[in-house]
Image (spheres, rainbow, N blue to C red):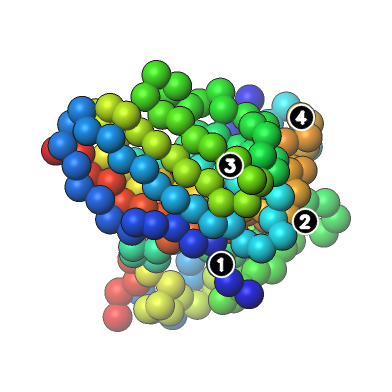
Amino acid sequence: EAGVAQSPRYKIIEKRQSVAFWCNPISGHATLYWYQQILGQGPKLLIQFQNNGVVDDSQLPKDRFSAERLKGVDSTLKIQPAKLEDSAVYLCASSLVVASGNTIYFGEGSWLTVV
Amino acid sequence: AQSVTQLGSHVSVSEGALVLLRCNYSSSVPPYLFWYVQYPNQGLQLLLKYTTGATLVKGINGFEAEFKKSETSFHLTKPSAHMSDAAEYFCAVSENEKGNNDMRFGAGTRLTVKP
């Protein structure tokens, strides 16, 4: 079974530029998550989708971050304009359903460096 | 809201020694608890999880954890460390309340295994 796919794996941009990350979840998984993991910290949930609807985006900095999952399968996370503090690993994850206790499967992450 | 505290950002053990990684949680409702492992430049992989039932949970690679409600703890153990266990370990909690899968992670514990 294919895992969660993410691209690009690594990206270096200058501050105030924009960047987009793509994610394809495990086939059949209705729930998709984007997490931000800053060096030395645990992952922090940015946004959670159930099919193509947003379940929770309370921790997403909406002035610069946006995410969509238009067809309920793959998803894109965009940052515009980027700040130095956005340097982090952006982890996409998926689970079969949205209910608590369901195992969340993670991709390998997209590493962003803002200079 | 739920939260997790991992005691000790770095733990070092000798090969063959006992591994003990500590995790305490805070939750207003019965929690679901997880341990994930992250190898360098990779995403998170589930080691084990507690949802309901038996409080001693066995996971992959010889790890196990025990849910102790009275101590609000979910410590991870392995009887004999192997060099391949060197990685970052994250404890996480998800509340069984809102119907979403709002998983909160601890800051992580980096395990070093000495030969």
**Are the two marked residues, 4 and 3, in contact with CB atoms closer than 8 angstroms?**
no
Q: Distance between the residues labelled 3 and 2?
A: 37 Å
**Coordinates of residue B47 in the picture (x, y in percent):** 59, 64
Residue A21 lies, in percent from the top left, at: 40, 47
Identify residue for label 4: B98
Residue sitting at the far front: A71
Q: Quadrant of residue B13?
A: bottom left
Q: Can residue B94 be seen in this snapshot?
A: no
Residue B32 in the image: above or below residue B39? above
Disc 3 chain ID: A
Residue A32 got which mark?
Answer: none
Q: Which chain's residue wears label 4?
A: B
Mark nearest the camera among 3 and 2 is 3
* Residue in view at x 58 percent, y 57 percent: A25
The crowd level at tag 2 (other Cα within 10 Å; few <14, some 14-19, many 20+) is some
Q: What element carries label 3?
A: loop
Within 10 Å of disc 3 (Cα), the crowding (few <14, some 14-19, many 20+) is some
